[in-house]
């Protein structure tokens, strides 16, 4: 029987074709919020696949069906599940699902109300559509990597959050939900083309607004959000790090007061970009005199816009994070709790991680009556 789930998406059925990266994360988000997410996996792991570890957190709360999609029987099994679901998630290169006999035309013929979500880096069309790539490449091309790093240095390689998760998974989730709403109103499904180059470029909109108003320059380290001494990270005496982000004048005044710099004329004009390199050095010297905990004791909880830079394990133990229950441990593994939060239909704890093919019989019985 279908397990009883709670959350705002309870009752929604999502079929996910197993992959790596943003597609599974999107499926996890749906599962976290109560949807019945069934992930279709290979009977055995592919020999050329990337081993992302023995604890696939992105599969939590899902049910697993193992199918050989290179056989007619396997394809028919998937299509039977397609008939019963609200949305499908796939992250193959363009053309792969069509070659398997599971492309959007076939699936929409079996289920006209289906919202068929396609997750790729480059998108379904364009000169690069069939090329390999990863998060770093997509955000490099879209412009989202440009402001990462210091002047005169190569851009920093960020963790796969800006592209895979921010520009990929989240845009796919919004697209699927919008498509489902439209299908329920109009009775017709559609294809959602979620490309990381599209999403990460769209995420640039606030920075593009600053650029249009002259507040973001072409050069790194010369703009409001990547150059000032008051919007940066600093090393402390114990080699830990802190962050300050005192963007508005009233917050900058409080930071100066807390640091004992309110009477120093050197810090009078926070928006003079010519002085930023010197003032960053001044701040670096100042923050290096005390430990991170000492700076927390002075600045945390004030309006100076301050936070320590924490590792995930440290973050899980921070009083604010503990009070909100932002992290949890399941079977000894650190998880981030479902987000966002809902007052009337709260999500439950993260669901268990299924074994490959664990739910073949249950899902086929629940969804197809077979």
Image: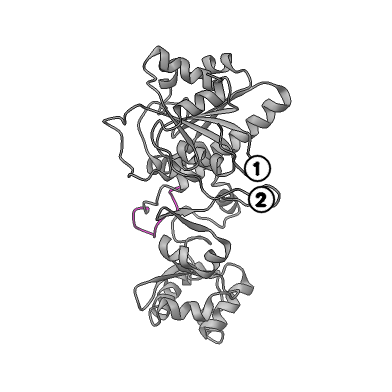
Residue 197 locus on image (x, y percent): 47, 37
- From where the camera sits, is residue 257 visible? yes
Magenta stretch in the rendered image: 143-155
Nearer-N-terminus badge (1/2): 1
The residue that appears at 58% across and 47% down in the rendered structure is 205
Query: Does residue 237 appear to the left or right of 351 in the view shown?
Result: left
Identify the secondary structure beneath mark 1.
loop
Image vertical order of residue 191 relative to residue 261, above or below: above
As drawn, the label of residue 342 is: 2
Residue 324 locus on image (x, y percent): 58, 62
Image vertical order of residue 315 relative to residue 24, above or below: below
The residue that appears at 44% across and 67% down in the rendered structure is 233
Identify the secondary structure beneath mark 2.
loop
- From where the camera sits, is residue 143 visible? no
Q: Nearer the viewer, residue 229 or 216?
A: 229
Residue furthest right as drawn: 185
The residue that appears at 34% across and 73% down in the rendered structure is 239
* Marker count (numbered): 2
Q: Nearer the viewer, residue 70 or 164?
A: 70
Residue 352 locus on image (x, y percent): 46, 44
Q: Main secondary structure of the magenta part?
A: loop
Q: How crowded is mark 2: few (under 14 residues within 10 Å), some or many (20 or more)?
A: few
The residue that appears at 42% across and 31% down in the rendered structure is 18
Query: Does residue 19 appear to the left or right of 225 in the view shown?
Result: left
Q: Nearer the viewer, residue 254 or 238?
A: 238
Tag 1–tag 2 contact (CB < 8 Å): yes
As drawn, the label of residue 8 is: 1
Q: Nearer the viewer, residue 74 or 86?
A: 74
Image vertical order of residue 36 relative to residue 145, above or below: above
Location of residue 333 by image quarter: bottom left
Q: Residue 151 colored magenta? A: yes
**Quadrant occupied by the N terminus:** top right
């Amino acid at each position: 029987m279908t397990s009883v789930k709670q959350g705002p998406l309870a009752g929604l059925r999502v079929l996910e074709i197993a992959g790596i990266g943003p597609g599974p994360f999107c499926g996890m988000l749906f599962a976290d919020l109560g949807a019945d997410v069934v992930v279709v996996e290979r009977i055995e792991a592919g020999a050329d696949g990337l081993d992302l570890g023995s604890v696939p957190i992105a599969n939590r709360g899902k049910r697993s069906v193992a199918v050989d999609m290179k056989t007619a029987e396997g394809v028919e099994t998937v299509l039977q599940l397609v008939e019963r679901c609200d949305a499908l998630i796939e992250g193959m290169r363009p053309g792969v699902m069509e070659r398997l006999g599971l492309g959007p035309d076939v699936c929409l013929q079996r289920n006209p109300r289906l919202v068929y979500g396609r997750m790729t880096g480059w998108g379904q069309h364009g000169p690069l559509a069939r090329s390999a790539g990863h998060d770093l490449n997509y955000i490099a091309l879209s412009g989202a990597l440009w402001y990462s790093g210091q002047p005169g240095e190569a851009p920093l390689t960020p963790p796969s959050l800006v592209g895979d998760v921010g520009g990929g998974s989240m845009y796919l989730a919004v697209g699927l939900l919008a498509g489902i709403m439209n299908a329920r109103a109009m009775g017709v499904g559609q294809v959602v083309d979620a490309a990381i180059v599209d999403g990460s470029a769209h995420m640039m909109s606030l920075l593009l607004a600053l650029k249009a108003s002259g507040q973001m320059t072409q050069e790194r380290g010369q703009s409001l959000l990547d150059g000032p001494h008051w919007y940066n990270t600093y090393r402390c005496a114990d080699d830990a790090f802190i962050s300050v982000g005192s963007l508005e004048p009233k917050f900058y005044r409080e930071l100066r007061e807390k640091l004992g710099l309110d009477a120093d004329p050197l810090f009078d004009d926070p928006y003079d970009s010519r002085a930023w390199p010197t003032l960053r050095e001044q701040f670096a010297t100042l923050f290096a005199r005390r430990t991170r905990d000492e700076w927390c004791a002075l600045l945390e909880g004030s309006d100076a816009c301050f936070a320590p830079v924490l590792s995930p394990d440290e973050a899980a133990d921070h009083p604010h994070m503990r009070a909100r229950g932002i992290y949890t441990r399941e079977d000894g593994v650190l998880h981030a709790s479902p987000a966002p939060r809902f007052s009337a239909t709260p999500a439950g704890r993260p669901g268990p991680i299924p074994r490959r093919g664990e739910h073949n019989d249950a899902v086929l019985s629940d969804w197809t009556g077979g």
